[in-house]
Amino acid sequence: MGNNISLLLVVIPLIAAPIVAVLPRGRLPWAVALLVTSLCALLAGMQLWAVLHGGVISYELGGWAPPWGIEYRIDAVNAFVALIVAAIAAITLPYALLSVEQEIPEEKIPLFYSALLLCLTGLLGITQTGDIFNVFVFLEISSLSSYALISLGRKRQALTAAYQYLIMGTIGATFFLIGVGLIYSQTGTLNMQDLSTILPEVLHLKTVNTGFAFIMIGIALKLALFPLHLWLPNAYTYAPSVVTVFLAATATKVAVYVMLRILFTVFPYGFALATPVEELFMVAGIASIIIASVYAIYQEDVKKLLAYSSVAQIGYMVLGIGLASATGITAALIHLFNHALMKGALFMAVGAIIYRIGACRMDQIHGLGRAMPWTFAAIVIGGLSLIGVPGTAGFISKWYLVTAALEQGAWISVVVILFGSLLAVVYMGKLIEALYFRPITDSGKEVTEAPILLLVPTWLLVFANIYFGLDTELTVGVAEKAAAILGGGNP
Amino acid sequence: MSEFSPFLLFFIAALLVGFTRDLPRQLILLATPVLTGLHLWLNIEVGSSVSYSIMNYELVAMRVDKLSLLFGYLFCIASFIGSIFAFHVKDTKQHIAAVTYAGSALGAVFAGDLITLFIFWELLAISSVFLIWARGTERALKAGLRYLVFQVLSGVLLLAGALVYFHDTGSLAFDHIGLDAGIAGWLIFIAFGIKSAFPFLHSWLTDGYPEATVTGTVFLSAFTTKVAVYALARGFAGEEILVYIGVTMACFPIFYAVIENDLRKVLAYSLINQVGFMVTGIGIGTALALNGAIAHAFSDVIFKGLLFMSMGAVLYRVGNINGSSLGGLYKSMPKTTVLCIVGALSISAFPLFSGFVSKSMVMTALMYEDYGYLWLLMLFASAGVFHHAGIKIPYFAFFAHDSGIRTEEAPRNMLIAMSIAALLCIFIGTQPQYLYAMLPWEVEYWPYDVTHVLAQLQLLFFSALAFVWLNKKGLYPPELPSVNLDMEWFYRKLVPVAAQRVVTSLRDTKASVLSIATVPMQDIQTKFTKSSVAKYYLSESWPTGSMVFWISVILVTFLALNAFG
C-alpha cells in the first residue's frame, strides 16, 4: 500500500459517489456510503500512523514528478486533519440512516448520499493535495456538493440559505483563485513545496502581497471568520440534521487547515508576521468570540444557537493562529479536533430531538430533557465540553489557548477567552434550562427517547469528548508535531 | 505494587464504609490506619517516590522523606485512636468524612508537588466540614459554613500561589519556597497561614471546632493544623517572621482561653497556642528548632487528642460542656478524670510527660539563637498553658464546686482510646529517644538535665500557686455562660451589618441608575435595529449584500495596511 493510501483516500469516495447515485432506492446507497466512509476512516488512521512513524509521504499523480505534476504531500498536519474528516464522516453515517429517511424525500436519498460522498471527496482532497490550484478544485467540489446538501433541508428557507451560501462561497472561492493566479503570475509554479522555495525571493512584489491578501480573505470567508460568517448560521440551521453535523465538524476545520498551510508552509514563516494579517486575525478572533457568543445567547432556534457558537469557536482557533507561536498553532489544532468532537456531539443530539418532534425552537423543546434523558445528557456533556470544564476535551483546548496567550503576554486575549467561556455558560445554560427546567408541553408528553441508532453515534462522540479531555496523548502529541512542521523549525 | 500512596487505603475504606454497617465497618475503620501504618513501616523507604503525569505535567503523588514519613505515622496513630473513640458512632456520614479526611491529610503530607498538595488541601477542607455539620444544630451549620469559607479561601490562595510560582520558576515541586519567591511565596504563605491559624486568620478554628460532633473534634484537632505545620516546615523553614507570628500565637489565645466558658473552645484556643510553639520552631529554622517543632506536633496531636476526647466524653455523657454548669464529675467519671489529667500534664509540659520533651527543644533553640525577650514571652505562654489547659480544664470539669450532676463513666471504647493516648503521652515523655530517632534532622539533644527540669517545675508550681491564690481570693475570672467573640466579631457582626447596608444602598442606587441608563439605552437599541447597519451589514436576512460589503472593507483595509504599514 504505502504511498497509495493518500490517493485511495480521495479516489475511493470519488468513484463511489456516481455509483451510489445510480443505486436503487432503499437502504443500499446508505450501506455503500457507510462502507466507503468506514474504509476512508481506516485509511486515514493508517496514513496518520505511517506519517508519524515514517515521515512525509509524497505521491506523484500520474507519475509526473513535481513541481510539474500534481503531488500529494502528507505530513502530520494534513494526516491529522484528514483523520478528523474521515472519522467524523464514519461516525455520522450510522446516524444518517434514520435521520435521512425521515428528513429527505425517498427518491432523493441515493443522490443525497452521492453528494455527501462528493463532499467528503472534496474535503479529503483539500487535505491531501500539495498543489495550491488543486486545493481550489477540491474546495469547489466540496462547496458545490454542500450547497446541494443544504438545499435538501426540510424547510423552504433551506433553499435560500443554500443559494446565499452559493453566492458567498463562490465569491470566497473566486478570491482564492484570484490570489492563486496572482502568485502564479510571479512564480510560475503551483506546487506548495516549490512555492515555498521561490516565494521568499519575490516577497517584495506588490502583486504577491495582493495575491496573499486575496487568498487570505477567500479562505477567511470559507472558514466563517467574523464578519464573513454571515452564510454560516442560515446554512447550518436549515440544512438536514446529518449535513449540519458533518459540515459543522469538518468543513470549517478544513478551511482552517488551508489557512495554516498557506500562512506557514507556502509563505515563509516570518512573512505573515510582517503583514497585518496577524493583527487582523487577533481582532477578528476576539470580535467573533464575543459578538458571536452574544448573538448565540439571543437565538430562539437551537441549531442557530449552536451555529453562532461555532462562529465563536472558530474565533478561538483564529485567535490561536493569530498568536503566531508554536503553542498558539498547537492550541488552534487541538481546538480544531476538539471542536469537531463537541459540535458533532451537540448537533447529533439536537438532530435526535428534531427526529422526535420535527423542530427545535426553544419554546417547542420545553421539558424534553426529561422525556429524552440520554439525548439530554449528551447535550449537557457536550455543553460542558464547549464551556471548557476540566475533564472534557474543551478544557484542553482552552488550557492551551490560555497558555499560548500568556506566553505572548496577550492579556486581552486571555480575558476574552475566559469571558467567552462565560458566555458559553449562558447560552448552554439557556438551552439546558429550556430542556430540563421548564414544564413539559402537552405535545411533549408523548415524546420518547431517540432510537438507539441515533444515540450510539452521539454517545460515541460524547465519550470521545471525555476521553480526549483525560488522555491528550493523541491530540496534543500530534498537534505539537504538526505545529513544529508548520513552524518550519523556527521558534 | 509495593509502593502505592498511603492515602489510597483510606479512600478505599471511605468507599467501603458507605456500604457496610456495624461490625464489618468497625473492623474496616480500625484496620485501615493499622494497615497503612504497617505499609509505611515495611514497604516504603525514605527517598522513594511515585509520580504520574497529567497534561505533560509531571506530578509527584508520593515523595517520601523522614519528614513526611513521621507525619505519616502520626496521622495513622491519630486516625487509629480516633476510630476507637468513634467506635460506637452509627452515623455513616461521619465515618466517611473522618476516613476521607484522614486520608487527605496523609495525601497532603506525601504530596511532592504543589498541585497534588492543593488537591488534598481542598479535600481536607471539604471532608472535614461534614464533621462539623454532622452535629446537626443550627449553630454547627452556620459555624461549618464560616469554617468552609476560610478553608476554601486558603485552597484558592494556594492554587493561585502555585500557578504564579510555576510561571516564575517553571517548577511545581513542593520544596523550600521561601518568602523571597515574591508574590507566589506570599500567596502560598498566607494559604498555609490560614490553615495553621495565624493570628487574625485563626477564627475558623475557635469558631468551628467547638461546634463539631463529640468525635469529630478529635479528628479535627489532629489533622488540619498539623498538615499546615508540615507544609510550613517544608516550604518556609527559617523565615524569621514566623518566629514573631509563632510567639503571638502562643501568647494571645491565653487571655481568651481564660475567660472562655465552653471547655472545648478553651481547648481550641490552647490548640492555637501549641501550634504557636511549632510555628516559632519553624521560624527559628535551626535543626534543633525544626526537630522541636515537628516533635511537638507529634506529641500535640496525641495529648490534644486526649484532652478533646476527655471533654468529648463529658459532652457525650452530660450533654453540655460549659465550665459554669459542670463540676464534681470526678465522682461519676473517675477514669476519665485521671486520663484527662494525664493529658493536662502533658500539654503543660510536666517532666516525664510528652509535652516536656518536645516543647523544651523549641525553648532551648530560642535560647541558642539569642531571642531573649521572646524566650521570656514563651515562658509566659507556657505558664499560661498550664493555667488554662493544665488546671482549668480538669478543675472546672471534674472538680470545682459540685454541680450535682451524676452520670456514668465514659463508654468503654472511649476509655480505651483515651488510655492508648495517655500511655503514648507517658511513653514519649519517659522514653523520648524513640521519638527523637524518627526526627528528620540529626541533632544530639536530651531534655532531662537539672536546670531544665527545675526551671520547668518552678514555672509550673508557681503557676499553680497563682491559680490557687486567684481562686481563693475570688479574683479568677468566673465561668459565666456567655459567648465570647474575638476576631469573629468582624465577620459575624460587623460584616453582615455592613453588608446589609451596602446591599440596600446598592439596590437603591441601581434602581435610580437603571432608570437613568435604560431609557437612552433602549432608545439606542431601537434606533440600532432600525438603522441600516443592523439591517444590511450584520443581519442574516440580507447576508449576501452585507458579506460583499464586509469583504471589500477587509480587502481594502488589508491592502492599505500592507501598503503603508
Image (cartoon, grey):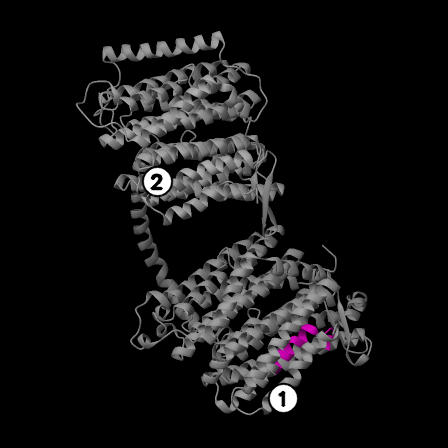
- Position of A489 relative to B141 (above/below): below
Q: Which chain is indicated by disc 1?
A: A
Residue A455 pos. (x, y %): 46, 72
Residue B82 numbered mark, or none: none
Q: Secondary structure at mark 2?
A: helix
Q: Give amino acid for label 2.
A: Leu
Q: Give amino acid for label 1.
A: Pro
Foreground residue among B458 and A408? B458
Q: Which residue does the numbered mark 1 point to in the structure image?
A: A18
Relative horizontal placement of residue A21, taking residue B105 as reference (left or right): right
- Residue at x 74%, y 74% (from the top left corner): A1
Please identify, in this view, whether the residue under mark 1 or under mark 2 is nearer the observer: 2
**Furthest residue to the left?**
B404
Q: Which residue does the numbered mark 2 point to in the structure image?
A: B131
Magenta stretch, residue numbers: A118-133
Q: Secondary structure at mark 1?
A: helix
Is residue A223 among what the camera can see?
no
Quarter occupied by residue A210 = bottom right
Residue B189 pos. (x, y %): 50, 34
